[in-house]
Amino acid sequence: MESFLSSFKSAVELLRRHGERGDQIRIVTHSDADGIAAGGALTLTAMRLGVPFKASCEKRFHEGLMEELASEEPPLVIFSDIGSGYLDMVEGRLPKSDVVVLDHHKPIKAEAEGVVHINPLLHDLDGSREVSAAGLAYLLAEMLDEGNRDLSVLGIIGALGDQQDKGERRSLLGLNTRIEASAKEAGLLETGVDLIFYGYETRPLAKAIAYTTTPFIPGLSGREDSCVAFLKEVGIELKRGGRWRALRDLSEEEKRRLFSSLSKHLVHEGCSSEMVHELIGTIYTIKGEERGTSMRDGREYASLLNACARMERPGLGLSLCLGDRGSALREAEETLDLYRRRIAEYLDLVREEGRIEELGNIYVLRGRDEVDDRLIGVVASILLSTGMLKSPKPIIAWASSDDGLIKVSARATEAMAREGIHLGAVMMEAAERFQGRGGGHDIAAGAYIPEELEASFIELVDKLIGEQRHGGGED
């Protein structure tokens, strides 16, 4: 742990030096919930330094991005939640810029000339579960100035957005607990254990269940009318005193009744017993946010950022991280509504007969141009988590992207990772062999490859995962 924290020193000094000079800071962050939260923390740090800055959110690392940065010649470039798998593309390309990479994905190599590379995996820490990119951004900001401790909240949001709540009762682990402690000491965060539904603080009960996708509840998630009927059958009042009731309004007896009925529903739908336990977990309450708002619950906050990223509105998510609670929040909530409806539509589509193919070591979902490439990974995660795939195998899903490429999203379970599966390693190796780029974590990874090479790529992925399962691959 100490060697990892020491690895921030050079980046802190660069940030301080450029801050004293009044130099522009160029922030490039990944376009997902964690990346947006990381970008928010870094942008607020630059604003507090009083220096000019420019921030952008990128869906993927590409040659055009490097050409753009080379032409801009910013004094300092910070990559967050992106870069470790592309150090070879960065090395030597920005001679007039100092470069920092803050990432927690599997690196292509440990070092690159002219790059300060900070990655927990280089210090035997688990980047998939113990710290997010937003957590790294917070640590950098806090080491620069203890007055940035309030940014610990964004570190928590990033971890929840990356689904790092893998501890007992869906709590955070590792370095995330240190960030959590900082937020609590500053009076910014409190935790408790309860039923976990989207909209714990704010949403009418039927909406809260309908909007919940982790876990995804077949027949209820995305279907508000079905949730209304379900709650009436369970005997839970939807309104009291003329006001819609939220989860926080239920008595303990009502919560027990609801949990029992949902458990039976999940079992009836053929879902795994593990999913039942995901209904209860740690609630992360952001105390600085107004009561009764969607930003007060940490997972709701992260869900808003995720929806903004998936629906190509990352700038909207960044505005939330910077403190906009007016029009940006209203637009983000509308974006989330659209996002959830789209996911429900895609799930109906991919569950049709013949959409999913089972191979020796994997399932394959071909979304082609019928599923948005920004959402194919979400669909794959839901299919895997609900127990719809009967054999314990990873799912490899792809959808058409731009420039003749396809986006591949690979998902596995924690149990598969314990067996030695590392999807990030598979995606990196397979994509490299087929004119693409890939990488990621052990249970969630991705790649971009030419569409005409899809069949050969899938064949190799199936082979590599088989080798990992039987002890021939890396863990």
Image (cartoon, rainbow, N blue to C red):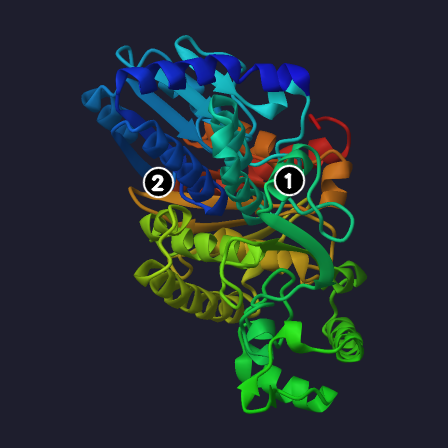
Q: Is residue 155 above or below residue 273?
A: above
Secondary structure under the numbered disc 1 in the rendered image = helix
Looking at the picture, tell me which residue is in the foreground, 390 or 457.
390
Placement of the N terminus among the 4 image quadrants: top right
Q: Residues within 10 Å of mark 2 (few under 14, many from 20)?
A: many
Residue 132, compared with residue 114, is above or below; it is: below
Q: What type is the residue that disc 1 sits on?
A: Glu
SS category of the residue bearing label 2 = strand
In the drawing, does residue 295 fall left or right of residue 23? Answer: right
The answer to whether 213 appears left or right of 368 in the picture is: right
**Mark 1 highlights which residue?**
185
Image quadrant assignment for residue 339: bottom left
Residue 150 in picture, x, y percent from top left: 51, 40
Where the C terminus falls, by quadrant?
top right
Residue nearer the viewer, 427 or 336: 336
Q: Which numbered disc flags the more N-terminal residue, 1 or 2?
A: 2
Q: Nearer the viewer, residue 340 or 151?
A: 151
Q: Can I make out residue 77 in this image?
A: yes
So how many labels did they put on this image?
2
Residue 62 appears in view = no
Name the residue furthest left. 71
Which of label 1 and label 2 is nearer to you? Answer: 1
Q: Residue at x 39, y 17 (%)?
A: 16
Q: Position of residue 309 (x, y in %)?
A: 40, 51
**Dot 2 corresponds to which residue?**
57
Say which of 253 and 213 sits in front.
Answer: 253
For residue 444, the mark is: none
Instruction: Classify 10 Å Cα crowding around label 1: few (below 14), some (14-19), many (20 and above).
Output: few
